[in-house]
Image (cartoon, rainbow, N blue to C red):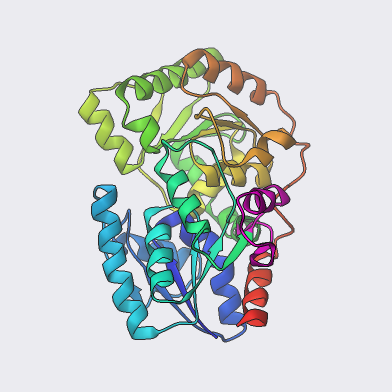
Amino acid sequence: MKLAIIVGTRPEIIKMSPIIRECRRLNLDYFLLHTGQHYSYAMDRVFFEQLALPQPQYNLNVGSGSHAEQTSKILTGVEQVLQKENPDVVLVQGDTNTVLAGAITAAKLHIKVGHVEAGLRSYDRLMPEEINRVLTDHCSDFLFAPTEQAQQILLEEGIPANQVFITGNTIVDAVSYNRVLAEKHVHILDDLGLKKQEYFLVTMHRQENVDDQHRFHNILKGLHDLNKKFNIPVVYPVHPRSSKKIQEFHLDSPGVTMVEPMDYLGFLNLECNARVVLTDSGGVQEETCILGTPCVTLRANTERPETLAVGSNLLAGSYPENIVQCASVMYSKKPAWGNPFGDGTAGEKIIQILRDAI
């Protein structure tokens, strides 16, 4: 079996890392293709080094752009690599333009496609990620569902049962492995002047939040009100997309400590020690659930309903009063929930399924 692993964003690298490590452990024939969807390859070098991963054999350096522009560049670049390498299986993870373009390219070249984290649905077609994940699921041959709920969604959409596998989510594998590494980055709290359990942590970068001036303003106001109520820092590592929009919309953020984007291990340490995390990221909803950190999601829906079911997460949307109310509830929340995303062996299971099938 020759395996192609395609990534394009940092969350994809994190969630593919257990699969890459399993390929290395078994000395399998594989290669790693990085599209560079959001970041330059140079910026990601340190990311691979931190996670003890090999550097990609291929990088496309696609960069940002409109959805059509970005997807077309990835389609063209991936096609050239796949025609050269001719793998048996292409693995993609999640819901980005990289995932959709990688899956479609492989399918049209008659190469088997495996979708890691299949079956997630927000049922909000205004989200580009929802379009990507639905289309990817329906052109994949192996659908690795993280939970029984995700499996059921796929079956109800007519995907054959013999193509769907419950594996757990590779984020559990990754957090278990990387948490030990992150503990060595304790200096991040000192660098930011923070104390354990005495700060809110924010991540926000999704298009529906930061591209809408009114919505972005409301969320920042909610964060300001939160700082005013609890009188503890609200720390926001600002994604480049968000920073650009803050300047474009002339938004201010009193009460919010905006800092530069940070490396993954530093951010993971901040997640571990925050009182509450407020986010619009699906991956962060999962990580906080696994780490035992209360979470508030700055969206009206989520494709991670398991976090709501176990009580690790609340949906706040973008209204300031809702943000403060939900954060206040989670501020007093005890992390007594269970982990719904598997036992930390998803990477091993995925590779074994492919080895048995190919």
Quadrant showing the C terminus:
bottom right
Q: Is residue 201 above or below residue 358?
A: above
Task: Inspect the magenta stretch and tell me whether residue 58 lies in it.
Answer: no
Q: Position of residue 294 (x, y in %)?
A: 64, 33
Res. 62 visible in picture: no
Quadrant showing the N terminus:
bottom right
Q: Is residue 260 above or below residue 325?
A: below
Task: Inspect the magenta stretch and tell me whether residue 149 lies in it.
Answer: yes
Q: Position of residue 39 (x, y in %)?
A: 31, 56
Q: Who is closer to the viewer here, 288 or 311?
A: 311
Q: Quadrant of residue 302?
A: top right
Q: Would residue 86 appear left or right of 286 to someone viewing this image? A: left
Q: Quadrant of residue 277?
A: top right
Stretch in magenta: 145-170
The residue under the point 62% across, 75% down is 351
Q: Who is closer to the viewer here, 346 or 138?
A: 138
Q: Who is closer to the viewer here, 119 or 245?
A: 119
Q: Position of residue 24 (x, y in %)?
A: 56, 80
The residue under the point 30% across, 57% down is 71
Residue farthest toward the front in the current orientation of the protein:
158
Q: Is residue 309 above or below residue 284?
A: above
